[in-house]
Amino acid sequence: ALAIVLVVAAAALLALAEAPAASRRELVLGRTALVCPFLIAMVSMPVLAGLLAVLRRLAPTRPLAAGAAAGLLGGAAGTMVYALHCPETGLPFVALWYTAGILLTTLLGAGLGKFCLRW
């Protein structure tokens, strides 16, 4: 997963370098940058809740890591759904803000997992 993030980040930086200076800000911020990560996290919540419920029955020995993994998967699923409705298509925007949404959901999953997955 880290290799994919690095490749996308490199491609986003290349796209920014090739873009005219006047359009770089728009490529990074778009029109929805302030809400994008939070909407991704919100869309991810049903998947995260379901994963935490399933993981609770499996009695994980490392609840923080299990919650983070559930958050990562939930964030990826939420990002997929959000991407179908997001008006932004620039690679710099996607690389930055979609990743931020997935990381936010991963942190939420880790925090919830620490308490919800104890046994």
Image (spheres, grey):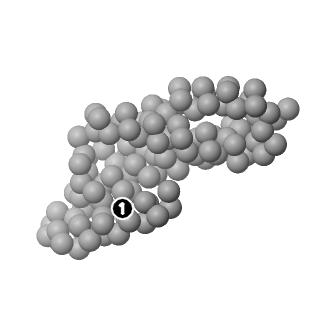
Residue furthest to the right in view is 119
- Residue 81: x %, y % from top left: 37, 33
Q: Nearer the viewer, residue 107 or 51?
A: 51
Q: Nearer the viewer, residue 98 or 55?
A: 55
Report crowding for label 1: few under 14, some 14 to 19, many 20 or more residues within 10 A (C-alpha).
Answer: some
Q: Is residue 108 visible?
A: no
**Quarter residue 39 falls in:** top left
Q: What residue did someone put label 1 on?
A: 8
Residue in the image at 18% along x and 72% along y: 18
Q: Is residue 117 visible?
A: yes
Q: Nearer the viewer, residue 38 or 43?
A: 43
Q: Secondary structure at mark 1?
A: helix
Residue furthest to the bottom in view is 17
Horizontal placement of 57 versus 2: left or right? right
- Residue 95: x %, y % from top left: 36, 56
Residue in the image at 38% along x and 65% along y: 7
Q: Is residue 23 above or below residue 36?
A: below
- Residue 60: x %, y % from top left: 78, 39
Q: Is residue 1 above or below residue 107?
A: below
State the quadrant of the C terminus: top right
Q: How many marks?
A: 1
Q: Amino acid at mark 1?
A: Val
Residue in the image at 66% along x and 31% along y: 52
Q: Is residue 50 above or below residue 75?
A: above
Q: Nearer the viewer, residue 81 or 54?
A: 54
**Quarter residue 105 falls in:** top right
- Residue 69: x %, y % from top left: 62, 45
Residue in the image at 67% along x and 27% along y: 54
Residue furthest to the front in view is 58
